[in-house]
Amino acid sequence: MKRLLNEIRESVLISLNAINSNKVRSSLATLGIVIGITTVTILQTAIEGINRAFEKSIASVGADVLYVQKFEWFGRDDWEAIRNRPDINWQQYEYLVRNIQGAESVCPTVATGSTVTYKDLSSENVFIFGTTDEYQKTLGLEVSEGRFFTGRESDAAFPVCVIGHDIKESFFGNTDPIGKTIQISGYNFRVIGTYDKMGSMLGLFSLDNRIIIPIYVFFKIFGTRRSLTINIKAPSIEAIDDTREEVRAIMKRARKIPPGEKDDFGVNQQEAFRQTYESLTGLIKTIGTSITLLSLIVGSIGIANIMFVSVKERTREIGIRKAIGAKRSTILLQFLTESVGICLMGGIIGLIIAFPLSLLIDKLLLPTVMPLWVIFLALFISASAGIIAGFFPAWTASKLDPVEALRYE
Amino acid sequence: MNEIIKTADIVKKYIMGSEELYALNGVSLTIKKNEYVAVMGPSGSGKSTLMNIIGCLDTPTSGTYELAGQNVSELDDSKLASVRNKQIGFVFQTFNLLPRSNALHNVELPLIYAGVSKSERIQRAKEALEKVGLADRMMHKPNELSGGQRQRVAIARALVNNPSIILADEPTGNLDSKTGEEIMELFDSLHKLGNTIILVTHEDFIAEHAERIIRLRDGKIESDTLKQINKTIET
Ligand SMILES: Nc1ncnc2c1ncn2[C@@H]1O[C@H](COP(=O)(O)OP(=O)(O)OP(=O)(O)O)[C@@H](O)[C@H]1O
Ligand SMILES: [Mg+2]
């Protein structure tokens, strides 16, 4: 045991020494590993980032939620045929609420852009979102500070609001927004709650830039002409198909469409987003894995190559070490350590490159997150590449005949 | 158990194309503890081959070799490595130090492979370097040392693990005669301290230091002379 520890320590020292005295060669040899580790790291941070963004974004909530709207999200009818569809109005919402059996909860939403001011700060085109107190329950989104408005506040059209993360940041910075008064389209509203950051998932909607107010207040300020979205939470994911059929039937009656005629509304579902999301991460995975594998293979061949050179150059050293008592396993360990060392160096360089790159990608393209396990994964992969690439050269070194090796010039 | 080396009919055969070359052709000899032996003979007579076999760096084609009562021919690679590590101290003509390591580390190396703890290793390596008169050169790398000093480092390395025998293949071959003489004085003192020493040389004045001279010719022992009693042992 002691012997093994000694040998490992000695191997590490020898490797550091060898790498140090061949800096350029070792660095060039690691190029493939560097590229491999950079891609695998960026790939994982991107997937992790997308996953987290998806989990947080509104798209992740409500796999069991249906959205009744004027249009289908992924409809195939051309615009001419559908643009004259009648709005979804309050009567239809009430009709639906009255008749539906298989629903956990139902809430209407309506939205518009408006100017919001706080003290001397002002922001145009903020997404103002009117709904009822059922919203929270339907979408399952918890406020992070304060609270959502109550049924009483909703019904009695209290001028209160819950604000998204970006709104909170731009108006209040680090100060507490709860209880403050902001103006929406000139009307005073008291802030009663805020949401955590969700991030925008590839253009999917999020609450970050949103202000939620009671729907009756919305109607008073902005009128009732806008088409509603009705959110319906099914009792369970399994029941969602039944619920959708029931909703369609009720909406057809509400909108007076004879049975057998085509719907003039959409019953939408987040599932479609989930599919887009899954195909996106799948694509990143496939491309990234191929680049990673390819560069790791090329990289390993490069490492194996310089390890052979290194063994050749140090034939005499191997002879000396054997003459004074190094076993085959000792020599094997020594060269494996060296090749793992070179690959780990490549891995660390890869990580150092990947880190700012993933921040850049986060800014420009996709959300990325670098968790600790990605770092360990990268190091594990580079160490494995080192073992695989170094094994054959190290094996050759360990099999050298000491007499021959000592005679080598 | 006074006989430390006992070989019987050792043959080392090389096959070069269609020719067979006998580097050693039936060598039987016995060497006792604390003997001081010089091996001489013309170039190509098999001196280095014999030393390599005695030092367990090489294995004979046939014949048996017992080192300190153990039949070495039966040992596997890892056991042989351990024998080289603990029982044999090798000194080479070309020093064979690790060029990138300082004197201390070079001397420490056998102890690393023996699994000796760091503090003890440093302690013993320093002692060995002091013994060869290099206490003030421990941190020097081989290329910062003279030939004689390098050979002293090599001798310190050979000594450090207290081996049963010290084997030196032309240890003065790369040194001028004055430095060579100094190295030989070092061997003499090691011998007086109780070490068993076998060295190969071409020079009579070097061989003079030994008590016994074995001459090889064409892979066979030509003569085996004990100096004190000045008589030839039959081979
Ligand atoms: N690996 C080898 N393959 C073929 N022949 C070899 C090999 N090693 C040694 N020999 C031959 O064996 C014979 C003995 O060699 P050895 O090195 O033992 O001679 P030596 O007595 O040490 O000579 P020198 O005084 O020149 O060092 C030589 O003829 C040499 O050519
Ligand atoms: Mg020789």
Image: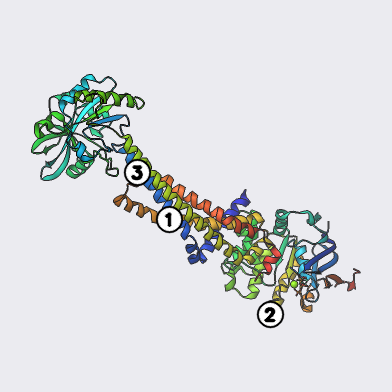
Quick check: marks 1 and 3 in contact, CB under 8 Å? no
Task: Give residue A129's quadrant in the image.
Answer: top left
Question: Which residue sits at x=58%, y=62%?
Answer: A308
Is residue A79 toward the left or the right of residue B142 in the image?
left
| Disc 1 packing (10 Å; few <14; some 14–19; many ≥20) | many
User: Viewer-proximal residue, B174 or A254?
Assistant: A254
**Res B118 visible:** no
Q: CA distance from mark 1 to mark 3?
A: 21 Å
Q: Residue at x 59, y 57 (%)?
A: A334
The quadrant of the picture showing ligand 1 is bottom right
Label 1, label 2: how many angstroms apart (C-alpha)? 54 Å
Occupied quadrant, residue A277:
top left
Q: Mark 2 to mark 3: distance in Å? A: 75 Å
Whether marks 2 and 3 lie on the same chain: no
Give me the chain letter of mark 1.
A
**Can you tell which mark lies on residue A50?**
3
Classify mark 3: helix, strand or loop: helix
Disc 2 packing (10 Å; few <14; some 14–19; many ≥20): few
Color encoding of the figure: rainbow
Q: In the figure, residue A400 lies in which quadrant?
A: bottom right
Residue A289 place in picture, x, y as percent: 45, 49
Q: Give me the residue at 15% from left, 27% from top.
A: A90
Q: Nearer the viewer, residue A55 or A261?
A: A261
Looking at the picture, how far across and down is residue B8, in whole percent?
Answer: 86, 61
Amino acid under disc 3: Ile
Task: Please report, as a chain letter, where disc 3 is located.
Answer: A
- Mark 1 vs mark 2: in front: 1
B1 to the left or right of A86: right
Q: Amino acid at mark 2?
A: Asp
Determine which of the numbered discs, if any, sits on residue B176 in the image.
2
Q: Circle 1 is placed at which residue position? A: A350
Q: Chain of mark 2?
A: B
